[in-house]
Image (spheres, coloured by chain):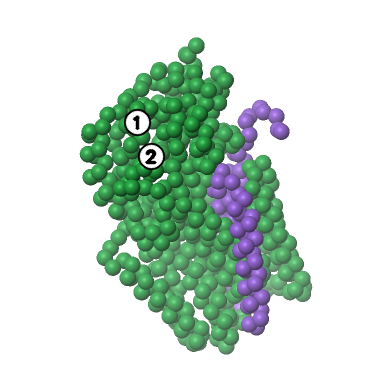
Amino acid sequence: MIAELVGLLVVFVLAMFVGFEVITKVPPTLHTPLMSGSNAISGITIIGALIVAGRGDSRVTSWLGLIAVIFAMINVVGGFLVTDRMLEMFKKKPGEKRS
Amino acid sequence: MNPALIKLFYLLAAVMFIVGLKRLSSPRTARSGNWVGAIGMLIAIVATALFTGILTWQMVIIGLIVGSLIGGFLAKTVKMTAMPEMVALLNGFGGGASALVAAAEFLSPTSEVGIGAPFHINLTVGLSVFVGALTFSGSLVAFLKLREWITGRAVTYPLQKTINALLVLATLTVVVGLVLRPEMGWLFAILAGLSLILGILSVIPIGGADMPVVISLLNSYSGIAAAMTGFVINNEGLVVSGALVGASGIILTQIMCKAMNRSLTNVLFGAFGATVQQIGPAGGAAAAGSKTYREITHEDCAMMLAYSKLVVVAPGYGLAVAQAQHEVRELAELLEKRGVEVKYAIHPVAGRMPGHMNVLLAEANVPYDQLLDMETINPEFDHTDVVLVIGANDVVNPAARNDTSSPIYGMPILDVDHAQNVIVLKRSMRPGFAGIDNALFYEPRTRMLFGDAKDSMKKLVAETKHVE
């Protein structure tokens, strides 16, 4: 049991380092889309929300699960779509050929 | 399906998130990167729905549909100027969802969490609810402040720090209590309540100008909250993704703090917005009275621009408030047709959140290769003919470099005063939002162009067309 937790801790710390490495390479121009995009990724908590909402073991937890699914899904769909909307606007000079 | 195999899907999703974030390192690949991430998320959702043994579909389906509709609506309708509010809101929903999942796990009669569970499991539940609920209420306050539905200024009251410190202590005590005596369910409600109050009280004292830091920090928290929930439900997918977002938020927070020359503790506990109000008028007004500045007409300004080699535009949020981005781009295109090189100097805190000004200019069809960050553009000012300062103030104030008594001393700035000529577009000589007088306005190389930014830009466009 405690071994499981430590295993997750190892994953957590290593993933933080991956995150630092990858994200320091994002140019300041893209920091707003980075924020909204990473925000959508934090909506991964949808996994937990789906499990809780679908277990149907008590009325209270089902309702909590429903709200959790809604919240997480706003986060996921809103985050990815708004990021796409922003990134679509980032263009090179119009009419200039792609190098 | 074997639970171990489902984890392979989560691994795939996590890898796709990392690849997606990696593709954000260039505007060329960023859009496809975002879709890689989105598909990763879709895989995670479908795998969860199909293979984790969901028994009751009603709540799952209603939730997925309602959430998608609200999220899609927000994403399609939000104005680019309102992006900070949008991100604050999304942070809040992410944090809220994580807290709710942890709560449902604790209350569920069939899960391994709660009564009878080993202490370290209940510890993760406590922390997950703490971080998630704090992110939720804090983000909502940030959202309300940014929308200006409540005052954007720093709200302070006596013993603020003491009260907040006591609240943190009380919350952590409740977490410990919950770990030792999980059968006392009411402790759980108290924990959630305290965390929500703490979120509100810790964002309330932060002034409008510091909001970019706060949004970045809440972004980080929303990731940490997701990771914590991963610990609760023993899921590596959540832990990895949450850690990525946590790291991203921390980096952005650091960048923002550095750009304002403030430490994080100073932002969180300093109530900057409140103190500057007292410093500003005293020093600023007196100085403005004794010094002289020079004005320029739109005609002369257009002439000067038209015969330049290199023009740099230094925009601030005032530009977006005046909605003059399109006029700026129009002027830039006219100048480029005459063979003038045009670049944009973007200070990290030019907008209302990290990278915000770039998005606003991209929306006005400014090509991204003309948007240069502070480190890249600063050496170029030495051979710049004209700098157009539009709606920016503190980020071009040379006092940050040489006046140790200035409240913004030490803040990195755009070295616009190194250029041959500086033209400042401004409504009047009154000090700006932060109330700090700007020495740049009185430099011999500086000319003031008074009026509404949009109006002035329109006139400049018209005049430039007439220049032979």
Chain identifier of the residue bearing label 1 in the image: B
Query: In which quadrant of the rendered image does the C terminus of chain A lie?
Result: top right
- Determine which quarter of the picture holds residue B289: top left
Residue A38 vs residue B343, the one in the foreground: B343
Residue B166 vs residue B84, the one in the foreground: B166
Discs 1 and 2 lie in a common subunit: yes
Residue B418 seen by the camera: yes
- Give the answer, above or below, for where B115 lies relative to B460: below
Chain A colour?
purple
Residue A77 seen by the camera: no
Three-letter code, disc 2: Pro
Mark 1 falls on what kind of element? loop
- Position in image of residue B59 (x %, y %): 60, 67
Residue at coordinates 69% horizontally, 54% vertically from top-left?
B19
Mark 2 falls on what kind of element? loop
The label on residue B398 is 2
Q: Say which residue label 1 marks.
A: B443
- Position in image of residue B355 (x %, y %): 52, 45
Separation (CA) of disc 1 from disc 2:
10 Å
- Give the mark nearer the N terminus: 1 vs 2: 2
The answer to whether marks 1 and 2 mark residues whose Cβ atoms lie closer than 8 Å is yes
Q: Any idea which chain is the green one in this picture?
A: B
- Position in image of residue B323 (x %, y %): 44, 34
Mark 1 Cα-neighbour bin, 10 Å: few <14, some 14–19, many ≥20? some
Residue at coordinates 41% horizontally, 39% vertically from top-left?
B396
